Image (cartoon, rainbow, N blue to C red):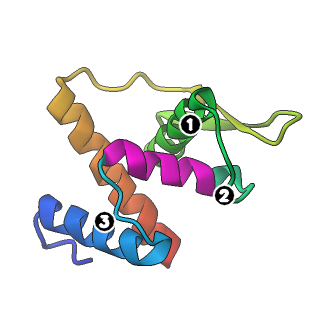
Amino acid sequence: MEDEQPLDVQWEQLLDTLEQTVGKRPGDLNSVLFLIGVQELGQGIKHFTKEQKQDLMHIGICRILSVSGYYEYEGTDADGWPHWRLVTPLPAGDLLSQELLLKIHVLEYFKSDAQ
């Protein structure tokens, strides 16, 4: 993915890459955050409850925003689930600006993971 390309083009390229990797194209940002959460949990693919899926999306959010100092990794619990602490409040904004912030961080996550 080229940094010079518009964000929406980079996002579509990422979704294409994830489709090739996982076998299914993620439907939205939450799906990508879920995949990041599963990756960060490191327990492989298995059946997750609805609550665990929400927790995995939260792990994904914390992980990608930790790069910019919003969250700090605290460690794992007895079940091996990672826990994060909010260090810096997230910037206020509407839903679109929050989604943009997350997408930028997701793209950075996969760029750094590929290197």
* Quadrant of image for the N terminus: bottom left
Crowdedness near tag 2: few (<14), some (14–19) or many (≥20) residues, C-alpha within 10 Å:
few
With 35 as the anchor, is 104 left or right in this view? Answer: left
Q: Residue at x 48, y 70 (%)?
A: 22
Residue nearest the viewer, comparing 87 with 5: 5
Residue shown at the point (70%, 59%) measured from the top left: 44
The residues tagged by marks 2 and 1 sit, at their Cα atoms, a distance apart of 12 Å
Are discs 2 and 3 less than 8 Å apart at CB?
no
Which residue type does callout 2 highlight? Ile
SS majority, magenta: helix
| Residue wearing tag 1 | 53
- For image coordinates 41% across by 52% down, the residue present is 32
Where is residue 13 drawn, in percent x and y?
A: 25, 72
Task: Find disc 2 in the rendering and name its residue.
Answer: 45
Nearer-the-camera pick, 18 or 24? 24
Where are the magenta residues, as a range?
29-39
Indicate which disc residue 41 carries.
Answer: none
Kindly state the secondary structure of the residue where label 2 is placed: loop
Q: Provide the secondary structure element on which disc 1 rests.
A: helix
Does residue 109 lie above or below 66 as drawn?
A: below
Which residue is at 20% across, 23% downward? 93
Q: Which residue does the numbered mark 3 point to in the structure image?
A: 15
Residue 6 lies in quadrant = bottom left
Alpha-carbon distance for marks 3 and 1?
20 Å
Can you give x and y, in whole percent of width and height, for residue 9 in the image? 14, 67
